[in-house]
Structure formats: structure tokens, C-alpha cells
Amino acid sequence: MDDIDRSLLEALIDDARLSYQQLADQVHLSSNSTADRVRRLRQSGVLAGYHAEIDLAKLGYTLHSLTDAKLKDAIDRFDFERDLRNVPQILSAVHTTGEFDYQLRIVSSSTNELETVGDTLRQMGARDIQSRIVLGETKYNSARLLYGKL
């Protein structure tokens, strides 16, 4: 991967809807050469997909929490992960080391809804649950990783 590939990835991270011509203008190549490079990035797996970003607050999901969950000893983690797919408020589940087995990112419209999600997690096999309300978040663009390490 060279600097042109990095520039293409950075541009696509910023706006995945750019046409090949718009990308080509940014990296000073022809649109055919640019399309070939983007195809190679996709084929190699570096460019894994294109995504839409949804404003969850506009859908009523204004309460974000980070919730740690420890599973009961008899619960299979793969079954638990499969069951998590049926809880739409859970945006992500990270299997971790330490006191808890998972850190879950949960969105809800109210504390009552968050409590219902917690009850659901207990029914699915979570023994201990500890939630923290997210007050704010600073997001960093993954394009920062394209140019190396510190």
C-alpha cells in the first residue's frame, strides 16, 4: 500500500459516496486508475465495505451506556453472543479479560428501557451487570492509522 492508496482510503472514510472521478481528482490519477486501485483495496480486504451513519438521537435513542456483564458459569459464551443479536439496543459486545466477560455498548430511549435490557441480559445468563451512562464521546477517525504508528 502506497501513499495514493492511503489517500484513497482517507477520502472514502470521510465520504464513501465519492465517485471514482471525484476520488481521481483528489489523488491526481485518471478515474480508471483510481477505480483499479479501489478494486484492489477491496479484493485485498483492506477496504472491507461502505457504511451509512445513522443519527440514533433522531430515532429517539438518546441514552447511551457502557455495560459490563459477567456470565453465569453454566452459560456458553457463543450462545450468549448469538442471543445478543436479538437485542437491538446492543450496538456492540466486546469479549474481554478481567472481572467481567463482556463490555456492551447499549442505546436506549430511557432509563426504563435500559433497565429492561438489563433484565433481558440476566434472562440470557448474565450474573452481574454494571452500567455506566455515557456523558460524551470523542470519536477518532481510523484514517489516523494509515500513516503509521507513534
Image (cartoon, rainbow, N blue to C red):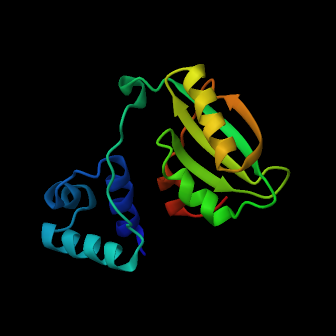
Percent coordinates x, y for residue 133 in the rendering: 66, 26
Q: Quadrant of the N terminus?
A: bottom left
Residue drawn at x 59%, y 41% as measured from the top left: 105
Percent coordinates x, y for residue 114 in the rendering: 59, 28
Residue drawn at x 22%, y 69% as measured from the top left: 34
Percent coordinates x, y for residue 32 in the rendering: 14, 72
Instruction: Determine the residue located farthest toward the right in the rendered image.
Output: 99
To which quarter of the image does residue 131 belong? top right
Percent coordinates x, y for residue 70 in the rendering: 77, 49
Nearer to me, 28 or 80: 80
Residue drawn at x 36%, y 68% as measured from the top left: 5
**Relative to 108, does residue 87 appear above or below in the rendering?**
below
Nearer to me, 61 or 79: 79
Nearer to me, 130 or 3: 130
Nearer to me, 64 or 69: 69
Q: Is residue 74 left or right of residue 84?
A: right
Residue drawn at x 57%, y 37% as measured from the top left: 106
To which quarter of the image does residue 150 belong? bottom right
Q: Is residue 97 left or right of residue 122?
A: right
Q: Is residue 84 left or right of residue 41?
A: right
Tally of numbered discs: 0
